[in-house]
Image: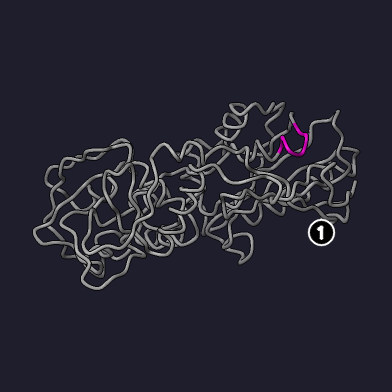
Amino acid sequence: MFRPYSADHGVRPLSTQGQLPGATRRVALALDALRHGWPITIDDAFTLLPAETGFGDGVKSAQMLISSARAVTLKLANQREAAVPEAPVLIRGAEPFDLPHARAVADPALDLLYPMKGPFAADHLDHGDAATAAMELARLAGVLPAFLFNPTPVGEAQALQAADLTEWRQTSHLAIAARAHLPITATDEAEIIAFRSPDDLREHVALVIGKQDGNRAPLVRLHSECLTGDILGSLKCDCGPQLDAALRAMADEASAGGWGVLLYLRQEGRGIGLINKLRAYQLQDQGFDTVDANNRLGLPTEARDFPVAARMLELLGVHAIRLMTNNPAKVSALETEGVIVSERVPHQLPPNPHNVRYLATKRDRTGHLL
């Protein structure tokens, strides 16, 4: 079962993969720019400076690019609630925006500290595809989806095209980077396999439990990273207990002659990132459920990357699975990517007083079978 580092077993050093295509390179550089607070320009249509991380003396802008959900929260006179909360909206205030003002406008978690904002109005937005790409780039970078629009003064901006994201989303760049024997509490018959893509900082892992059998569909769990639940024992969600129970179930499966695969996906907070997840927690403390909290941040309810899970299974030589999940959307997402889900295995655990509302929201608003 335990194989050495070898190209014969699917391990491909990234140095052999050649140069990144121009599109994915530009997206990778743009994400780095946003994390550092540097400006970007999309489709040569406009220049954007991230409101959260941006810096510079005297930087101002007459307009900001924010989400439709945030625009509704700010009670724009000419803005109605949109079907897509993260859709871009261009706003203008009575005075130009500087960076401190922009941050107060961008972050709903600061509303109680800075209650007096506006009045604002929504301006006509040209180049909608470029603006939509900007909102997605902010989510991928883990920063608030809010920008100073064509600010001055501004330094050299990282340029990219909205269409570059299509190439960046391709999972073909993902490869196995390393693998090793990893005894765990549930079983000492486990192998950890790390995956890496040269254009993505996230490093996903798989844990194969038992002896891999190509003639038998493994028990599979897609588990998205949850620092608060998996590591710190948070009671606000059910992630930690689900992870432990999945590993025990796979160990039992291996004892009975089967095997299991845990895919640990580095997409914290359903794909919105750790810091934005904590901002959502702060909004939940103010009374919003998890869906409304995400949307008030201008972020989608569900932003996880399920195609990358399908690519990981492909690299492992797994094509049919028994999937441990309460979420039919996971089944559909994997089947869309060509994975055969021969059985959905329920994976429900008892609630605790702190996560009762969270689980009810999953049942009532995101379609989980609980």
Task: Please state if 57 lies on the left or on the right of 227 as rendered.
Answer: left
Three-letter code for the amino acid on which mark 1 is drawn: Ile
Task: Please state if 177 lies on the left or on the right of 232 as rendered.
Answer: right
Depth check: give the residue in front, 293 or 163. Answer: 163
Outermost residue, left side: 94
Does the magenta run of residues contain 317? yes
Q: Residue at x 37, y 62 (%)?
A: 38
Q: How many marks?
A: 1
| Residue 123: percent from left, percent from top | 15, 44
Does the magenta run of residues contain 183? no
Q: Quadrant of residue 100?
A: bottom left
Q: Residue at x 48, y 42 (%)?
A: 23
Q: Quadrant of residue 322?
A: top right
Depth check: give the residue in front, 226 or 212. Answer: 212
Instruction: Say if 323 sits above or below 358 in the image.
Output: above
Classify mark 1: residues with Cα within 10 Å, few (<14), some (14-19) or many (20+): few
Instruction: Say if 100 sits above or below 65 in the image.
Output: below
Q: Residue at x 42, y 64 (%)?
A: 36
Q: Label 1's element?
A: loop
| Residue 284: percent from left, percent from top | 40, 58
| Residue 190: percent from left, percent from top | 84, 52
Quarter the C terminus occupies:
top right
Residue of label 1: 184
Q: Which residues are magenta?
A: 313-318
Instruction: Say if 243 sits above or below 221 in the image.
Output: below
